[in-house]
Image: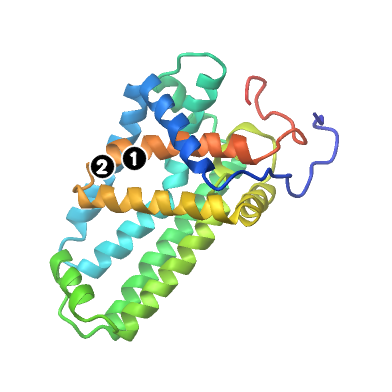
Amino acid sequence: MKTLAEPLPAVLPVRHVPTARPLLWLRLGWRDLVRTPGASLLHGALVAAGGLGITWLGARQGYVLLGAFTGFLLVAPILATGLYELSRLLSRGEAPGVADALNAWRRGTRPLVWLGLLLGGVATAWVGASTLLFSLFVRADIHSPEAFLRYVLLEQGDVAFTMWLAAGALGSAVVFAASAVSPPLLLGRTTGLRCALLTSVRAVGENPLPMALWAAIIMSAMLLSMATLMLGFVVTIPLLGHATWHAYRDLVDTSAVPLRFPDAV
């Protein structure tokens, strides 16, 4: 392992994993959730509450609601910081709790803070672009989530909606690639934001099939959670957060960078 005096690599090496590997990450994530139920489910409950709050605030404008909610999900990798810490401590044989998750936020590193600001900026830009696109080009009377769903289901082929969907898919893919493993990497290792982002993109690029499966699992979990009036987030957020930590440990070779904290892994 390198010391702090030695130059750090611009991007870390990544490992190739089998296509079905995300299923193992889920199994390990579920194991961590069961071992720390209180602290883990608290994360999910807070995200569910946030989702309900956004739903209430945007209930009068369906397209604004969807833009705001998808933007909220873009920052989910940062919201799971405490879950990464719980999994890290579990891997060391400890019995972590809520206090340990809070400590991960208190000791948040500067690159991790910058990543949070970056994702927050992307989410804000998406909300603004989404609202502007619909307000300028959609002529349908959309004043509620139900009206938005009717618009999507009954007026398929609308150019504005197609543009919105394509922009959302492209933006989500970029955010997924940049944040797939960068948050837990920044939490535990002494590396910069640029290195973490490039490493995350590299991990996705060199494992296209397993990461496509992982992205599909995440998207399915998000849709399921929304379909249950946000209650599903109570379980899906901690499950995916713990699983993401295992994905990071599985995909990234961190031997070239020093520990950020003496007891980190």
Confirm whether residue 171 shows in the render: yes
State the quadrant of the N terminus: top right
The image quadrant that residue 160 belongs to is: bottom left
Is disc 2 in contact with disc 1, using a CB cutoff of under 8 Å?
A: yes
The image quadrant that residue 145 belongs to is: bottom left
Count every numbered label the image shows and give the total. 2
Instruction: Look at 53% across and 35% down and name the residue there.
Output: 245
State the quadrant of the C terminus: top right
- Please, what secondary structure does the residue beneath circle 2 have? loop
How many C-alpha atoms fall within 10 Å of the one at disc 2: few (<14), some, or many (≥20)? Answer: some
Q: Position of residue 68 (x, y in %)?
A: 31, 60
Give 156 or 255, whichever is nearer the viewer: 156
Q: Which residue is disc 1 drawn over?
A: 236
Q: Position of residue 74 (x, y in %)?
A: 42, 54
Instruction: Look at 55% across and 42% down and name the residue there.
Output: 183
Instruction: Look at 70% across and 40% down and name the residue there.
Output: 191
Q: Please give the label number shown on residue 60.
A: none
Three-letter code, disc 1? Thr
